[in-house]
Image (cartoon, grey):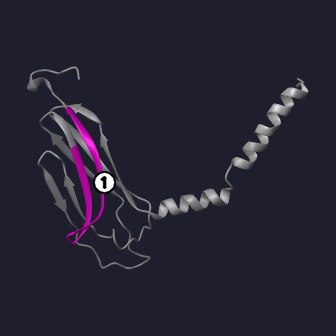
Amino acid sequence: MTLSSAASRSVFPAILFCAFAAPSPMVAADKDKKKDDKTSIQIKVNPAVGFAPFRAVLTADVRGGPDDNELFYCAATEWDMGDGNRAEHSDDCDPYEAGKSQIKRRYIREQIFDTPGEYRVMFRLKQKSKVVATGQTTVRVRPGIRDGGIDDR
């Protein structure tokens, strides 16, 4: 297959542009490292939507940051289900040791939502009364048969 000289001229600059536009591996690695240094909370609900009464499994994942982060070590947890239900939990832990103590990265809670609606679920990690991290998600509960039928929303 041969290209005309006009076709080869139009393809060649695009190839050069792509080669110069791609970030170097060192720059990409630096960006990933900076992103991983920041700790965040991600909450997932499974299944995402259901019919009342709705059984949901909520998972809060602690993402990024060091495994021995003192601020997150042995933190108390608080779940606010958005429907008036709250749950708090704290553990009795060994004293913190830098480089040795490990933070917990996953918290799981099962919750039953009895009535239809949209609920903003909040998860908080706390040290004493200070909130050190928070995450949220929305749970959608549709009317079930006991609520007068299933609507078509």
Residue at 17 percent across and 47 percent down: it is 82
Q: Nearer the viewer, residue 19 or 78?
A: 19
Q: Position of residue 108 (x, y in %)?
A: 28, 52
Across and down, in percent, residue 31 comes to 56, 59
- Would you name the residue on which mark 1 appears? 135
The quarter of the rendered structure image containing the C terminus is top left
Q: Position of residue 26 (x, y in %)?
A: 66, 60
Quadrant in the rendering for residue 89: bottom left
Q: Answer left or right for 21 relative to 44.
A: right
Name the amino acid, label 1: Gly
Tag 1 secondary structure: strand
9 sits left or right of 65 in the view: right
Magenta span has 130?
yes
Q: Looking at the image, which residue is at 27% across and 47% down?
A: 58
Q: Which residue shows up at 23% across the image and 68% down it?
A: 91
Instruction: Please determine whether, in this image, residue 139 is positioned above or below residue 91.
Output: above
Q: Quadrant of the N terminus?
A: top right
Image coordinates of residue 73 in percent, x first then y, are 33, 70
User: Residue, x 70% and y 48% (percent of image)?
Assistant: 21
The magenta span reads 120-141
Q: Majority secondary structure of the magenta segment?
A: strand
